[in-house]
Amino acid sequence: MKARSALAVAALASVVSACGSADAGSDILTVYAAASLKAPFTEIAERFEEANPGISVELSFAGSSDLVAQLEQGAPADVFASADTRTMDLAVADGLLGTDPVAFATNTLTIVTEAGNPKNIRSVADLAVDGMSVVVCAPQVPCGAAAARLGDAAGVDLTPVSEESSVTDVLGKVASGQADAGLVYVTDAVGAGGDVTAVAVPEAAEIVNVYPVATLADGRNPAAAADFVRYVTGDEARSVLGGAGFGTP
């Protein structure tokens, strides 16, 4: 089976699982994951399906804070992977988790510009130049919180023209020429290839986002969820994450 991406809440099937470790009654595993995890988690889900015949992984990607809001409203899911510990802590406080979170990856920010860097942006300070249109994530989103910390570390007051609900939206606005520059994760810049130009900033090394994953208390497939979390924190999945530019916790 091939892992399917969904931005809407995935419906869960009630059929007998062919995977020995999964609960009978469902062969679908619904995973909510931060938008920045889309590429590696799609591959990880496909590999997990190959290793667990009969299990189909449904992936839902969005900003971590949006995903928590959906879970708080009762959206059905089995696993949650956040782009920072602060957002995962909200899920803990709300009693949404079935197991303790486990850190599985790290990420840092970088500046991205239009391809070729026509504005010759070299530092965070350049983002504050008059007339520069900059986009960042909204403060409640992990990449937005990290952007604010990066501005503080660089001593720069960032005044973005827009604040987006996910890092992929920031990347999209820069790649399409709707903004001169944006702050995204290194992994997003790597995935964008030649669509943008990345500008490394030394201050970013001080702001590291740790990605945790956990099963959800109301998940309909707890055994398969636990298997997936173990897989994500294992060597094979970490190889996929490393290839996408993620660090190890």
Image (cartoon, rainbow, N blue to C red):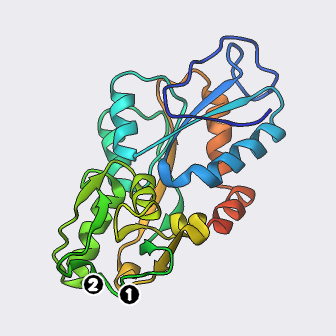
- Locate residue 8 relative to residue 28 in the image: left or right: left
Residue 95 in view (yes/no): no
Q: Nearer the viewer, residue 184 or 118?
A: 118
Tell me what residue is drawn at x 67 percent, y 24 percent: 28
Q: Which mark is residue 206?
A: none
Q: Amino acid at mark 1?
A: Asn
Residue 239, percent across and down? Answer: 71, 64
Residue 233, percent across and down? Answer: 63, 54
- For marks 2 and 1, the one nearer the N-term is 1
Tell me what residue is drawn at x 34 percent, y 43 percent: 65
Quadrant of the rendering where the N terminus is positioned:
top right
Q: Label 2: which residue?
A: 126
Q: Foreground mark, 2 or 1? A: 1
Q: Nearer the viewer, residue 142 or 118?
A: 118
Tell me what residue is drawn at x 60 percent, y 18 percent: 12
- Locate residue 249 relative to residue 123 in the image: left or right: right
Q: Label 1: which residue?
A: 120
Q: Quadrant of residue 6?
A: top right
Residue 59, percent across and down? Answer: 59, 36
Q: Are marks 2 and 1 in contact (CB under 8 Å)?
A: yes
